[in-house]
Image (cartoon, rainbow, N blue to C red):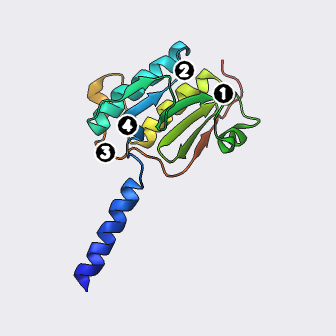
Amino acid sequence: MRTLIALACLTSLTFAADGGNTPRYGDRIVAPEKLSVDATAAVGDLLQYLKQITNHEFTRSTDRGDSGITLAHTSDSGVPAGAIDKLKGLGPEAFCLWPEGSRLWIVAHADAGLAHGAIEYLDQLGVRWYHVTEHWTIVPRRDDVRLSQPIVKSPAFRYRA
């Protein structure tokens, strides 16, 4: 009986961990070709740190396809309505991380929000930057980089000096 229960639990865990979706969102970063310097740097950070986290190479694409970590503006077509609704009334630096099957949407009104969203995603995965050198950067190892719940964040201050 214990063996049967253990096997049933193991089967459930395997299914839940895969769920029919890649645990790495297809090893793809989907981003517009033209982004600000900061947003372009954030895409580079995603490529670099996701490779270190998963030990798998991620590619950058402009073609959305069926999967990927997708950076998109609220004005782009195909962006989930729920993510757009969460950002209504928030400023250009606000962002939403919206998991949707084999895709993670990083959605914002402007490039500044996309950059903040990309870095928040890495933070959610456990990456920590304690100083500007690699020696002071913590990069956890894991194969599954999916998020289970949407995350919405906005700066505490409307304007910065």
Q: Residue furthest right?
A: 89
Q: CA distance from mark 1 to mark 3?
A: 30 Å
Dot 4 or dot 1: first in sequence order is 1
Label count reads 4
Q: CA distance from mark 4 to mark 1?
A: 29 Å
Q: Which of the two discs, 3 and 2, sits closer to the camera?
A: 2
Q: CA distance from mark 4 to mark 3?
A: 14 Å
Disc 3, disc 2: CB below 8 Å? no
Task: Mark 4: give few (<14), some (14-19) or many (20+) Cα within 10 Å.
Answer: some
Residue type highlighted by circle 1: Asp
Query: Depth check: 34 or 53 in front?
Result: 34
Q: Quadrant of residue 71?
A: top right
Write down the residue under mark 1.
76
Could you tell me which residue is drawn at 37 percent across and 56 percent down? 17
Q: CA distance from mark 3 to mark 2?
A: 26 Å
Task: Mark 3: give few (<14), some (14-19) or many (20+) Cα within 10 Å.
Answer: few
Write down the residue under mark 3.
143
Write down the residue under mark 4.
127
Q: CA distance from mark 2 to mark 4?
A: 24 Å
Q: What x and y, as percent, mark residue 136?
A: 30, 29
Dot 1 or dot 2: first in sequence order is 2
In the figure, 111 relative to 15: above or below? Answer: above
Q: What x and y, as percent, mark residue 8?
A: 32, 74
Disc 4, disc 3: CB below 8 Å? no
Q: Is residue 102 left or right of residue 50?
A: right
Residue type highlighted by circle 4: Val
Dot 2 or dot 4: first in sequence order is 2
Task: Mark 2: give few (<14), some (14-19) or many (20+) Cα within 10 Å.
Answer: some
